[in-house]
Amino acid sequence: MGIKVVGLILNPALGEKIAPVAREIVRFLAGHGVKVLVLREHARLVGMEGVDRERMREAAEALFSLGGDGTLLSCVPVAAPAGIPVLGINLGRLGFLTELGPEELFSGLEQVLAGRYCTEERLLLWGGIRRAGATVREVVALNDCVVGRGALSRPCRLEVRVDGHCAMKYNGDGIIIATPTGSTAYSFSAGGPVVAPGVDAIILTPICAHSYMVRPMVVGGGAVVEVFLETSVAGFGLSVDGHENLPLLAGDWLTVRRYPRPLRLIRTGERSFYSVLRRKLLLHGIEECRQ
């Protein structure tokens, strides 16, 4: 039985550039008997009534993200709790997460609606902020949970534990706790290793640690990571996939572990992580420099 209800999530920052493509996709899906749901904040772009995230989570059999990798990341809070598969449609540069580009958009959608696709599982992180003995906020991340400082903040003293054992203790600008999917994002820029998406691991990448001996670390995917803020510094917070910024206080504990469900990405063909890696990261800017 094919997909009958699709949640379409857009990048509103693209504005009028994205609206014609979104409307074409809605017409295409409707022509194939597929009901389309859009979020209220995106409804104006496609000329439809919108729904809230809870309704989309309950009704959608798949999510289609239209934009880039950042747009797909914004699907995680909707997709993760219900295990909804996500298809990334890329309107810009080559992405690590998105599957279809403008050239193969409608042929790829035909393939998905016909059931000729597979799903690729990606590890998700659950994060919980514990304050005065109570969990005050829970989050889910596909790329990373980042403890970091604001533009005018001073460094903070952090203690990082893995499975109850102290692994790092340092003064610095924070720490990136990344999945293999997120290893090519902020963690990579901060000196962390590239980890293939199929590896069961969590990457710990210190940010500007005031010690040469504090280096990135790769731990098992089943590890429980705890970060303790020893000192109080204004502006420190938790960023989740670059979409949220939650304030942290001295004495707070951040616990990060594997989320119970993986994220399922819809794939329509043989897509090489290594070819995308080479084009996006390893060769980026090299050709221009040689001229």
Image (spheres, rainbow, N blue to C red):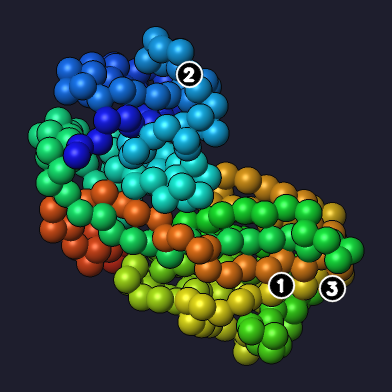
Q: Is residue 62 above or below residue 147?
A: above
Q: Is residue 289 visible?
A: no
Q: Secondary structure at mark 2?
A: loop
Q: Is residue 163 visible?
A: yes
Instruction: Compare marks 2 and 3 and give the one earlier in the sequence.
Output: 2
Residue at position x 25%, y 36% in the image: 3
Foreground mark, 2 or 3, reads: 2
The amino acid beneath tag 1 is Val
Q: Secondary structure at mark 3?
A: loop
Residue at position x 47%, y 56% in the image: 142
Instruction: Compare marks 1 and 2 and give the one earlier in the sequence.
Output: 2
The amino acid beneath tag 2 is Gly
Circle 2 residue = 50
| Residues under numbered marks 1 and 3 in contact, where contact means CB atoms less than 8 Å apart | no
Circle 3 residue = 230
Labelled disc at residue 63: none
Circle 1 residue = 227
Which one is in front, 281 or 35? 35
Residue at position x 34%, y 23% in the image: 36
| Residues under numbered marks 2 and 3 in contact, where contact means CB atoms less than 8 Å apart | no
Query: Is 7 left, or right, of 283 in this rendering?
Result: right
Query: Is 101 left, or right, of 181 in this rendering?
Result: left
Residue 226: give x, y in percent of width and height: 69, 74
- Neighbourhood count class around disc 2 (C-alpha, 10 Å): few under 14, some 14–19, many 20 upward: some
- Neighbourhood count class around disc 1 (C-alpha, 10 Å): few under 14, some 14–19, many 20 upward: many
- Quadrant housing residue 134: bottom right
In space, the residues marked 2 and 3 are separated at their CA atoms by 44 Å
